[in-house]
Image (spheres, rainbow, N blue to C red):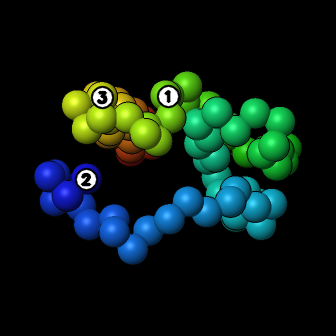
Amino acid sequence: MAEIGLDISAQFPKPLTAGKVQAADIVITMGCGDACPVFPGKRYLDWDLPDPAGLALEDIRPIRDDIRRRVLALLGELQM
């Protein structure tokens, strides 16, 4: 992420709690499965992406770029 100007060195994975889902309009999961809390009235998107853990940098870049494309597409959709 640093190579595209994002410093995530202080970040770490955080659990998707019921409170966070209740506060959201759209919930994006990446292979969460049955472990994610589900509430009526929320929009859920499950982005089927490979887990980058343990992958070489050249294998992580396409995943990162795919996430970027999906986020930009969602932002474009929400602005309409």
Query: Do the residues under discs 1 and 2 have CB atoms within 8 angstroms?
Result: no
First in sequence: mark 1 or mark 2?
A: 2
First in sequence: mark 1 or mark 3?
A: 1
Of residues 56 and 80, which is closer to you in this image? 56
Give the numbered dot on residue 1.
2
- In space, the residues marked 1 and 2 are separated at their CA atoms by 17 Å
Mark 3 is on which residue type?
Asp
Q: Secondary structure at mark 1?
A: loop
The answer to whether residue 39 is left or right of residue 51 is: right
Mark 1 is on which residue type?
Leu
Residue for point 39% across, 74% down: 10
Of residues 18 and 30, which is closer to you in this image? 30
Q: Where is 23 relative to 59, above or below?
A: below
First in sequence: mark 2 or mark 3?
A: 2
Give the numbered dot on residue 49.
1
Q: Residues within 10 Å of mark 3 (few under 14, many from 20)?
A: few
Q: Position of residue 13 (x, y in %)?
A: 55, 59
Q: Position of residue 79 (x, y in %)?
A: 38, 45
Q: Where is 79 relative to 23, above or below?
A: above
Q: Is residue 61 among what the camera can see?
A: no
- In space, the residues marked 2 and 3 are separated at their CA atoms by 13 Å
